[in-house]
Image (spheres, rainbow, N blue to C red):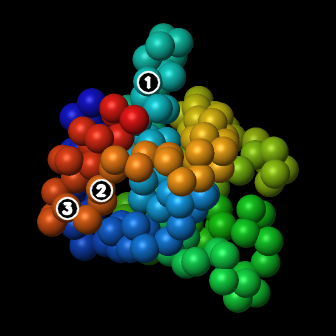
Amino acid sequence: MNSVLYCMEKLNKNSKLRQMDDYIQHGSTSCLKHTIAVAYYSIKLADRLGIKYKKSELIRGALLHDYFLYDWHDGNGRGVHGFTHPSAALKNADRDFALTETERNIIKRHMFPLTPIPPKCREAWIVCMVDKYCSLYETFNRKTAYEKVQTKTPDKFTELYKEIINF
């Protein structure tokens, strides 16, 4: 799955992607680890089911679906995180990247059914489902989810990539 690594390296340039490692998403899992897992398992699911999809758009959308760049546990009045973070992530991603409509749909609709409007494209449906799976895994394995994954490697995601696919 070199395509996840390739997209991560491309997105890392001139962006705040690495900041996602500073924020906890579920349990002890950072937003960065979470989005890498969602990207990886989205590809695995789509390939296993034989679904036709736009690979780079699915990966980019999955990597950016939680690009909200704040600590949602701090209680700083951003509304109910589950309802509001897709809009914050999309705003940040639109600011930092040239997004396709598919990527926008992935980011904006990944919280369905918590947010009432469903995804429009198959890539967004895949990420929506895999996000739920990864979130549950991280929540119920709070201390051990992806524990071997190190995201502090200098400028390269190679080790992170190798470790996430072996969790």
Q: x and y percent of residue 11 in the render? A: 29, 59
Nearer to the camera, 36 or 145? 145
Q: Amino acid at mark 2?
A: Gln
Quarter placement of the N terminus:
top left
Pick whichever of labels 3 and 1 is earlier in the sequence: 1
Counting other residues with Cα less than 10 Å from the Cα at mark 2, is it few (<14), some (14-19), or many (20 or more)? Answer: some
Circles 2 and 3 in contact, beta carbons < 8 Å = yes
Pick whichever of labels 2 and 1 is earlier in the sequence: 1
Q: Distance between the Cα atoms at labels 2 and 1?
A: 22 Å
- The residue carrying mark 3 is 153
Counting other residues with Cα less than 10 Å from the Cα at mark 1, is it few (<14), some (14-19), or many (20 or more)? Answer: some
Horizontal side of residue 131 vs 36, given as left or right: right
Q: Nearer the viewer, mark 3 or mark 1?
A: 3
In the image, residue 125 sits, relative to residue 104, either above or below, namely above
Circles 3 and 1 in contact, beta carbons < 8 Å = no
Residue at coordinates 34% horizontally, 33% vertically from top-left?
165
- The residue carrying mark 2 is 150
In the image, residue 19 sits, relative to residue 138, either above or below, namely below
Horizontal side of residue 91 vs 161, given as left or right: right
Counting other residues with Cα less than 10 Å from the Cα at mark 3, is it few (<14), some (14-19), or many (20 or more)? Answer: few
Residue at coordinates 61% horizontally, 57% vertically from top-left?
26
Residue 111 visible in the picture: yes
Q: x and y percent of residue 32 in the render? A: 42, 59
Instruction: Give residue 44's mark.
Output: 1
Q: Amino acid at mark 1?
A: Lys
Q: x and y percent of residue 121 in the render? A: 61, 34
Residue 61 visible in the picture: no
Q: Distance between the Cα atoms at labels 3 and 1?
A: 25 Å
Instruction: Give residue 36's mark.
Output: none
